[in-house]
């Protein structure tokens, strides 16, 4: 099992302190697009695992740009502390890249 997939399966904990409200957002770094918002890290990880099983040219993996046939997605998991408004970004980590020829965990 590669290191990125081990992380997705729960090997790493969130840096936000226990009990502090947080939100997890999956973003496509290549297109500056939010793909999903989750109240728990485990929910976001389950979504990423599902994305990895879907074809590169189907939603949500199909890139929104005109050159989508040669483009891909670069998913990041962003954690926010939601105690105050606006939310404060706590962490951002590259998680998964999907392209026509490859699925790669970070």
Image (cartoon, rainbow, N blue to C red):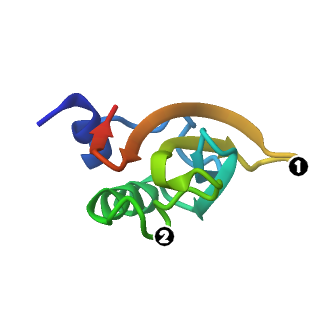
The quarter of the rendered structure image containing the C terminus is top left
Left or right? Give the position of 34 relative to 74: right
Q: In the picture, residue 30 is in which quadrant?
A: top right
**Mark 2 and mark 1: Cα distance apart in space:** 31 Å
Asked which secondary structure carries label 2, the reply is loop
Residue at 39% in and 37% down: 13
Circles 2 and 1: CB distance less than 8 Å? no
Viewer-proximal residue among 54 and 92: 54
**Residue 72, can we see it?**
no
Using the image, tell me which numbered label, if any, was put on residue 59.
Answer: 2
Asked which secondary structure carries label 1, the reply is loop
The single residue placed furthest to the bottom in the displayed view is 59
85 to 90, vertically: above or below: below
58 to 51, vertically: above or below: below
Q: First in sequence: mark 2 or mark 1?
A: 2
Residue at 42% in and 63% down: 57
> How many residues crowd mark 2 within 10 Å: few (<14), some (14–19), many (20+)?
few
Residue under pointer 1: 85
In percent of width and height, residue 65 lies at 65, 54
Residue at 88% in and 49% down: 85
């Amino acid at each position: 099992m590669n290191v990125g997939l081990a992380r997705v399966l729960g090997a790493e904990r969130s840096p936000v302190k226990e009990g502090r409200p947080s939100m997890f957002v999956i973003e496509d770094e290549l297109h500056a697009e939010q793909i999903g918002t989750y109240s728990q890290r485990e929910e976001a990880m389950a979504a990423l695992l599902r994305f990895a099983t879907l074809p590169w040219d189907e939603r949500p993996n199909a890139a929104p740009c005109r050159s989508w046939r040669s483009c891909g997605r670069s998913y990041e998991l962003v954690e926010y502390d939601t105690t105050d408004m606006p939310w404060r970004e706590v962490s951002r980590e590259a998680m998964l890249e999907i392209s026509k020829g490859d699925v790669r965990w970070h």
